[in-house]
Image (cartoon, coloured by chain):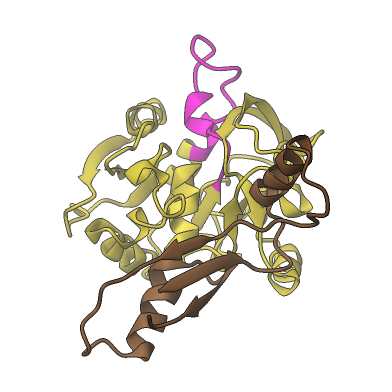
Amino acid sequence: MRIGVITFPGTLDDVDAARAVRYAGAQPVALWHADHDLQGVDAVIVPGGFSYGDYLRAGAIASIAPIMTEVVAAAGRGTPVLGICNGFQILCEAGLLPGALTRNVGLHFVCRDQRLRVESSATAWTGDLTAGEEILVPLKSGEGRFVADAATIDQLEGDGRVVFRYAGVNPNGAMSAIAGISSADGRVVGLMPHPEHAIDALTGPSQDGLALFTSVLQGAASPV
Amino acid sequence: MVDVMPKPEILDPQGQAVAGALVRLGVAGVGDVRQGKHFELEVDDSVDDETLHRVAGSLLANPVIEDWVVTRA
C-alpha cells in the first residue's frame, strides 16, 4: 500500500509520518503542496508543523494549496485521509472536517505525553484500536482547542464521530475534551496529538501510535 | 476594509490576556477585551461587495469561529 505524506512550507513532521508509514509496513510517498498530483496513492497523511508560519490562521493558507484540491476530491471518493495537528487544522479549514482549532485556553503552548481515550474504532485509521482503551502519544500545540457550535458537537457525539478524547486533564480547553474527530463516512480523521511520534520505544513514550498507521492497511474499517 | 472578530460565543484567550495586562498597567474601568484582525485591501472598482464578502468568508475569516464586516473607505 502506498500512503502519501504532504509537505507544505513549514511542515515539520512529514519525515516522522513517513517513518511511521514504513514501520506499519507500507510505502510512504512524498507529496508536494504545489502539485496537483497525488501520484495514485491509496491514502493521504497531512502532517503537523507550522505551514505558512500559521499566518492568517493555523492551516488557513495550506487549505487552499494546489495539492489540497486533489485531497478534497480524493476524500470525496473515499480515500482515507489523516490530519495530524497542523494537518487537522488544515482539514478543518479545507472543510473536510467540521469545527475549528483555536488558541489554547491559558495561551500556553502545550508539549507533553498525553493520554487519549479511543472513542471509535469504526474509522479507516482506528480499526486496530479498541473503543474505550487509552493510548499515550505526544501532544504539542498552541492552537489545539477544538470548537464548534452546539449543534455540530451534538451531531459529532450522536453519530459516534468523536474518535479521540483527552483523558485526565483537558490540556487546551477543547469542547467536550475532543482530541480527534472523523468525517461522516469515517474515512477522514483529524487529531491534535501526534501518533507518528509514538511508534518506537526508543523515540517515543509508547508504540501506541503505530496502530493508526496499521489500521489503514486493513481496509476493513466499516464506514460509520 | 475587512474587520474580522471572534464570534461572541467563542472564548478569546488573547483578548483576556490583554484585559489582564491593562489591569497591571493600572488602567481601571476596562471590562472585556476582544481581539480581532483588520485587513486593508486595495481593490479597483470592478471588485463588488459580493466578491469582498466571498474573500472574507473563504479566506480572511473562518465562518466557524469568526464574524466579519466589509467597509469601503
A192 falls in the magenta region? yes
Identify whether A78 is placed above or below B15. Answer: below
Colour in which chain B is shown? brown
A75 or A65: nearer the eye? Answer: A65
Is any part of residue A117 visible from this angle? no
Find residue A207 and report its horizontal and vertical position in percent.
56, 22
Q: Is residue A222 above or below residue A53?
A: below
Left or right of residue A130: residue B46: left
Depth check, front residue: A50 or A130? A50
Chain appearing in yellow on the rendered image: A
Magenta stretch: dominant secondary structure = loop
Query: Residue at 39% of width from left, 49% of height from top?
Result: A55
Q: Quadrant of residue A4?
A: top left
Residue A47 in the image: state x and y as whole percent. 40, 40
Q: Which residues are magenta?
A: A191-212
Q: Residue at x 42, y 43 (%)?
A: A217
Quarter of the image containing the C terminus of chain A? bottom right
Closest to the observer: B5 or A100?
Answer: B5
Q: Is residue A206 left or right of residue A153?
A: left
